[in-house]
Image: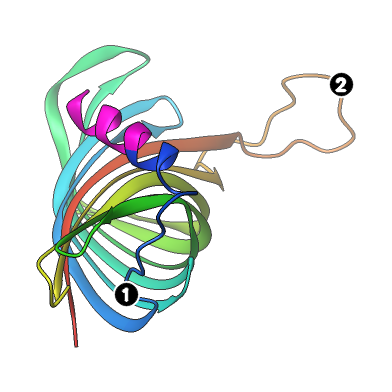
C-alpha cells in the first residue's frame, strides 16, 4: 500500500518534474519467480528463477526472458491430490514494456509499467509425459532505481499467462459437432517476480 501511495504522488508530480531515467541502456534482470495457476482441471504451483535482458529506449523497454521452475500439480477438480505430481518447466518469451508514469529525484526514480508479450513453455513431468504450447503474457509492475549512478534497480511485477492446449483424451462431442475431437483445455497462470536488474 505504501508503495502504491508513493507511485500516485510521483505520478502527480510527473508533469511538473520529469527526471530522466536510464533513457537508453541494456539491463540484465534476474530473481525468483512464483507460479500459481490451472492446467485444465488441475491446479498447479511452482517456484523458480526469472532471467531477462531488457533493452531500454526512453519509455519503451523490449524484454527477452527465460524462466525455469519446479512445478507441482496439487489438485484436480478443486480436490487435493494425495500425492502432488512434480515436474520442471522452462519458458522463453519476448515482451514490450511501457512506462506509463514516472518520477523521482537525482538519487531515486520510480516508474510504473505495463507489458504484453508472447512465449512458449514446456513442462516435463518427472513421472513421465510432456506438455508444451505457446502462450500470451500480460503484466504490470514497478521499476525502482536507487543511486546517482543508476546501475541497479528493483523490478517487482505480476503477470498473467494464458495458454490453450489439447489435453490427452478420447475424441468426443460435448455438444453438436461434425467431428469428435479431444477436449481442449485452457491454461491460466499467475506469476509474481521479485527481480533485480543492473546496467552494463
Q: What residue would you read off at disc 2?
A: 176
The magenta segment is: 1-9
**Relative vertical location of residue 184 with respect to residue 14 in this rendering, above or below:** above
Q: Considering the image in quadrants, where does the N terminus appear?
A: top left
Depth order, front residue of 91/106: 106
Question: Label 1 crowding class (10 Å Cα cut-off): few <14, some 14-19, many 20+?
Answer: some
The image shows residue 161 at horizontal and vertical percentages of 45, 45
- Would you say residue 126 is visible in this rendering? no
97 lies above or below 94: above
Residue 62 to residue 135: above or below: below
Secondary structure character of the magenta stretch overall: helix
The disc at residue 160 is none
Q: Residues within 10 Å of mark 2 (few under 14, many from 20)?
A: few
**Residue that label 1 marks:** 22
Q: Position of residue 60 (x, y in %)?
A: 50, 68
User: Residue 138 lies in magenta, yes or no?
Assistant: no
Residue sitting at x 45%, y 36%: 188
Say whether disc 1 or disc 2 marks the residue closer to the N-terminus.
1
Q: Secondary structure at mark 1?
A: loop
Query: Horizontally, is 102 left or right of 87 in the view?
Result: right
Q: Are marks 1 and 2 in contact (CB under 8 Å)?
A: no
Nearer to us in this view, 3 or 156: 3
Is label 2 in a helix, a strand or a loop?
A: loop
Going by the image, does 153 lie left or right of 5? left
Viewer-side residue, 56 vs 192: 56
Q: Is residue 190 visible?
A: yes
How far separated are the C-alphas under marks 1 and 2?
A: 57 Å
Outermost residue, top side: 79
Q: Residue at x 72, y 20 (%)?
A: 174
Residue 43 appears left or right of 119: left
- Residue 7 rendering spot, x and y as whole percentages: 32, 38
Q: Residue at x 51, y 54 (%)?
A: 135
Amino acid at each position: 500500500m505504501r508503495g502504491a501511495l508513493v507511485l500516485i504522488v510521483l505520478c502527480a508530480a510527473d508533469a511538473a518534474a520529469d527526471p530522466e531515467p536510464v533513457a537508453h541502456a541494456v539491463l540484465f534482470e534476474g530473481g525468483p519467480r512464483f507460479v500459481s495457476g490451472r492446467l485444465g482441471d488441475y491446479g498447479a504451483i511452482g517456484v523458480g528463477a526469472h532471467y531477462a535482458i531488457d533493452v531500454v529506449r526512453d519509455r519503451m523497454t523490449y524484454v527477452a526472458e527465460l524462466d525455469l521452475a519446479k512445478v507441482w500439480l496439487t489438485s484436480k477438480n478443486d480436490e487435493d491430490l494425495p500425492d502432488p505430481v512434480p515436474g520442471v518447466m522452462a519458458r522463453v518469451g519476448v515482451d514490450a514494456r511501457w512506462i506509463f508514469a514516472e518520477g523521482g529525484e537525482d538519487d531515486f526514480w520510480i516508474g510504473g509499467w505495463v507489458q504484453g508479450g508472447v512465449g512458449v513453455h514446456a513442462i516435463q513431468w518427472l513421472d513421465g509425459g510432456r506438455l508444451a504450447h505457446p502462450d500470451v503474457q500480460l503484466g504490470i509492475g514497478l521499476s525502482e532505481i536507487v543511486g546517482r549512478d543508476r546501475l541497479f534497480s528493483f523490478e517487482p511485477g505480476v503477470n498473467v499467462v494464458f495458454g490453450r492446449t489439447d489435453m490427452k483424451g478420447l475424441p468426443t462431442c460435448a455438444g453438436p459437432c461434425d467431428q469428435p475431437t479431444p477436449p481442449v483445455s485452457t491454461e491460466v497462470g499467475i506469476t509474481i517476480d521479485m527481480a533485480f536488474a543492473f546496467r552494463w
